[in-house]
């Protein structure tokens, strides 16, 4: 890992997070190595990498979305996924009830 990354970091500023994410993307370190070195969960570091990728994608758009628009789009996508999951759950419950009824007859 880079000498600019100090193992005793207590506060992770955006600049430090970005430096670590760049090292991961460049292959200089891995999420697992960084997790051990900085005593952090891999999921936290992976979250930073995911956030950075979303930010890069937006920055490279011809018409970048504003932060609010990004969050609204993300919320909409999550609401759609939740709705689909609820429909599937209801369908499975109805199917299970029909199967039980048929088994009972």
Image (cartoon, rainbow, N blue to C red):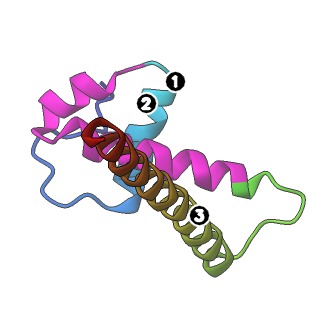
Classify residue 3 by image quadrant.
top left
Neighbor class of circle 1 (other Cα within 10 Å; few <14, some 14-19, many 20+) is few
- Decide: is 91 above or below 20: below
Q: Which residue is mark 3?
A: 80
Tell me if 101 is positioned left or right of 78 in this view.
Answer: left
- Decide: is 90 above or below 31: below
Q: Which residue is mark 2?
A: 23
Label 3, secondary structure: give it.
helix
Q: Are the residues flagged by discs 2 and 1 in contact, CB closer than 8 Å?
A: yes
Q: Residue at x 53, y 64 (%)?
A: 83
Between the C-alphas of marks 2 and 1, the distance is: 5 Å
Q: Residue at x 32, y 47 (%)?
A: 101
Q: In front here: 11 or 89?
A: 89
Neighbor class of circle 3 (other Cα within 10 Å; few <14, some 14-19, many 20+) is few
Residue 73, horizontal then vertical, whole percent: 65, 69
Tally the marks: 3
**Dominant secondary-structure state across the stretch colored magenta:** helix
């Amino acid at each position: 890992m880079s000498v600019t990354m100090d193992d005793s970091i207590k506060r992770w500023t955006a600049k430090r997070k970005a430096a670590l994410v760049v090292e991961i993307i460049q292959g200089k370190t891995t999420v697992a190595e960084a997790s051990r070195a900085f005593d952090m969960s891999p999921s936290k570091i992976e979250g930073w990498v995911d956030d950075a990728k979303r930010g890069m994608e937006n920055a490279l758009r011809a018409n970048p979305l504003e932060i609010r628009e990004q969050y609204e789009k993300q919320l909409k996508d999550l609401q759609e996924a939740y709705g689909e999951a609820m429909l599937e759950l209801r369908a499975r419950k109805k199917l299970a009830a029909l199967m039980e009824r048929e088994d009972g007859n």
